[in-house]
Amino acid sequence: MAKPATNEQVLQGTLDLLILKTLSLTPMHGWGLTHRIEQLSQDALQVGQGSIYPALVRLEQRGWIDTEWRITENSRRAKYYRLTTAGRRALAQEVASWNRFVSAVGLVLAAER
Amino acid sequence: MSHRVRAALARVKELFRHRSRSAAEQDEEFSFHLEMETAENLRRGMSDADARRAALLRFGGRQRFREETSDARGVVTLDNVARDTRFALRRLRRAPAFAAGVIATLGIGIGAAVGIGTIVYGVLLRDLPYDEPDQLVRVGFITDGIGTPGDLHSEVTFYHFAKSARSFTELGAYSTNDGFAITDGDAPERVTIASVTPRVLTLLRARPVLGELFGTGDTSWTNGRSPVLISENLWRRRYGADSSIIGRSIDIDHGRRNVIGVLPRSFDFPSPSVDLFYPAVVPVKRPQITDRYFNVIGRLRDGTTPLGAETELTTLLPALAERFPAITPDMLKRTRARVSVEPLKAATVASVHAQLVLLGVLVALVLLIATTNVVNLFLLRTERASREIAIAFSLGASRLAVAQRFVIEGTVLGLASAIVALPAAALALLTKFGFTEREIPRLHEVSFTEGTVALVLGGATLTGAAVGLIALTRCGVVGLFDRLRSSRSTASRRWRRVQNGLVAFQVAVALVLLVATGLLGRSFLNLHNARIGFDPENAMTFHVSLPWDGYRSYGANAAFHARVTDRLAALPGVTSVAVAWNLPLASRGVPALGMQLQAADDEARPAVASASNMATADYFRVMGIPLRAGRGFRPGDLRGVPAVIVSEGLAKSLFGTTDVVGRKVKRFSSRPWASLFTIVGVVDDVHWERIEDGYVPMIYFPLLRDGDGLPADSVPVPGEPRAVRYVIRGTQLPVATTIREIVKELDRRVPPSNIRTLGSLVDDATARVRLTMLLIAIAGVASLSLGVIGVYSVVSYAANGRVREFGIRLALGAAPTRVGGMVLGDGVRIVAIGTLSGLVAALGTTRLLRALLYEVEPTSVAEFGIATALLAAVTLFATLLPAHRAARTHPAIALRGE
């Protein structure tokens, strides 16, 4: 069952970024989050539903997101996650560092001889 | 606020948060998620059941969801601990042999470590129970040039240093004596007294519970008043803790004394058995340095070190000859006089320092071995349980959960081992292995306390948890993570080398201890069969000490003993009675070799230090000490040049021959006694305090019943028969009450004490070796069995790891004996390395036992051989079981399990 740890590590870092970005658009609950990410990536990314909650707990502990119980449109109680100010700052940093990473990798891959 | 701090705060908050609420919230969130997912799946056209199953599958298991979220929170919930504890108990119940093995091993290890560790700490390391103990020192005066043993002072050396030395704020002298009895009331009682200069009490900062101490400036008590301090023990025991005791007089056989204070129980100087403190005067009447009785202690001035003080006293030593012209510089040179200053604590425990350090190291080794073995047993078990762990992982258990389970299992076992460890530690601390503060100073300060219980429980829990953790990092979990698979083999190879090394080390330690046990056992047998020089069967002895009042002269003392002897001899069944200062093996605490003798007719021969005794004419016959030449004592022997009898050993060292009857011997002394004696007989050698110390040179003075009719003030021999031992031989020995009645009828102030058989004296004399042997034998057997467990577990562990290889070999047609032989080879290698290094270590260390050995060489081939053979046989036997199992591996095992 255990995933290879190296992949997990990468995924985890990326997952945090994806969650932060998605929550920056609007607060939402866990299930909504998984589907929203899949939808935004045009189903290219499959989010492990089991791993999203630990990630949310982690982010909450860092103070990047907040939680709140709200009533959904179908009048069900659900736990909503919302980006905090610290989370917004963190997102900006994460995005910047991701972009640096991508362009660095891009440079390497574009190298000719 | 950095997010690290925030995270820590969140964690703390989590701990306090109501656990059921957060679990309920989690559950709600989970079901909400599932519901949404199921609805989504239904919308995609799945059937009801499929939709739900798919949703669950995608989520990956509810248990895992719960655990991973708490993993992320970093919280081990109490709920999990309780569950895992129940689980651990259930698992252990299924493996009783494993549980019992671990509990016994850890229990013995921790119990021994705490018990003996507490003793070693209390005796060697803890501060003395006096104010600012680091300033306290013992000041010694040593003369290597003459036979006077020890570091005691004479009046002049103490006086000189007390007057001149600047290194000390105070200097005090004391001596002890147990020849005193309290005679008031119906039951006279023998007590130990300490004569102390007033400064001894003030420099130790003694505080009386009642009354006052001796004044340090005032010496009025030397003329007329006679104050005494009593111990709190005596005050409670004999005077019912009555505070009106202050100012009261008590009758002591050496004269009436006035109680001025009570010293607390916590003040145990110089020994807890002291009940009376006399103020000591150190009068310088006749300057001399050969008869020395005073222990000297001091308190160092601030900033002065013992070494600095010793340097000062050394420079002061020549001035002794200037202050007392009777002490010539030549005398100081000839006696090789020197001083020593050492910390009081070190001086107090010097006699046992080496043995206790050795004991502490042994115990640390036993604990180390026990822990290693338990880790090995754990590994062996988890290796077998690795499939179970794999299943737990695949069912979604998190790493933290599995780790927690290991640690909890270890902790449960550790705590359970307290069941063995607590009684073991209590036994060690309550019995103290039969030793008292006579053999091990400060031992009375050590006791079994709540602290011991806490130490055992804490130690057991921590060790258990640590064992669980170590086992965890070494096993199962490691193999199950793919990313570690590549590094696994090298890591485990290194670990296996460490393991093999530890087991070889255990085997070595076991061998050293077995050799020591063998050597001590042989010593004990030798002691038991040793020619002790007298016949201990059908004989008994008791001690009597006469007061000054009424018994001033030799003659008065002798007359009393003659009357007691006659009464005892008249009892039915008693065949003979004798009296002497001392009996062989009964002279504990009495310094031997207190007399300087020289051949009177041959001045060229060197002086000899000798023990001395005074004995009645019947003594040698009653004791069964053979007369080798000449005759026994008879009336008239005190007249003219008094007669003496010498032991063969003394005759040889004085004259170089045993043919000495009729020759004269000279005694050096500062006292006014005759110093020339005629030898009338030669007797066999005897022992003094212990058989293993060998024979002592002995000179016997006559104890003649009428004082030989000499005038009361004449002093024909050195000392009078005041404190003596009786020996009674017979077919039927009198009971203690009969003896007490007879003595009491003759003088009601005199309590006979120490009434016992001669055989019990011999038993006591071998007790030290017997106890040490017992201790080392226990350690030996423990380490042997630990070694066996160690070899077994490490060989099995290795064999288990190769079980597939064995299967393949067997399937390809290898002979089962060959496969078994491979496993056996593992064991043989470890045992061989262990045995060899053990032999080397034993050769190096058994020398430390020399003091305890009797007529056995520390490198005796027989004992080494037997121990080695025994160890090799037992440990090789331990590898037979895994070897046998390996040989019977079913080839199909190779195909299974992948």
Image: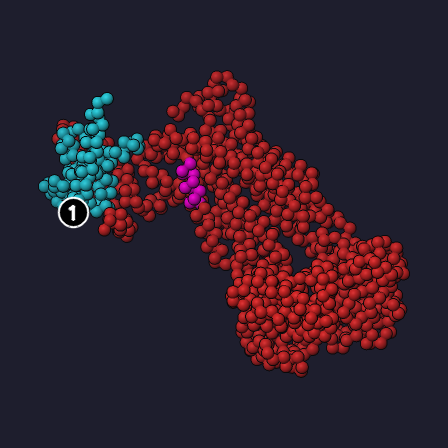
Residue B555 visible to an observer of this rendering: yes
Secondary structure under tag 1 reads helix
What chain is the cyan one? A
> Observer-nearest residue: B25 or A52?
A52
Q: Is residue B415 above or below residue B539?
A: above
Q: Is residue B887 above or below residue B65?
A: above
How many tags in the picture?
A: 1
Write down the residue under mark 1.
A85
User: In the rendered structure, does residue B738 fall within the stretch colored magenta?
Assistant: no
Q: Is residue B79 above or below residue B836?
A: below
Q: Classify mark 1: residues with Cα within 10 Å, few (<14), some (14-19) or many (20+).
A: few
Q: Name the quadrant containing residue A42.
A: top left
Image quarter (top left, top right, bottom left or bottom right) of the N terminus of chain A: top left
Q: Residue at x 70, y 44 (%)?
A: B857
The answer to whether residue B275 is left or right of residue A111 is right
Q: Colour of chain B?
A: red
Disc 1: host chain: A
Q: Amino acid at mark 1?
A: Thr
The stretch in magenta equals B464-474
Q: In the orientation shown, which residue stands out farthest toward the left? A: A73
The answer to whether residue B716 is left or right of residue A2 is right
Q: Residue at x 53, y 27 (%)?
A: B823
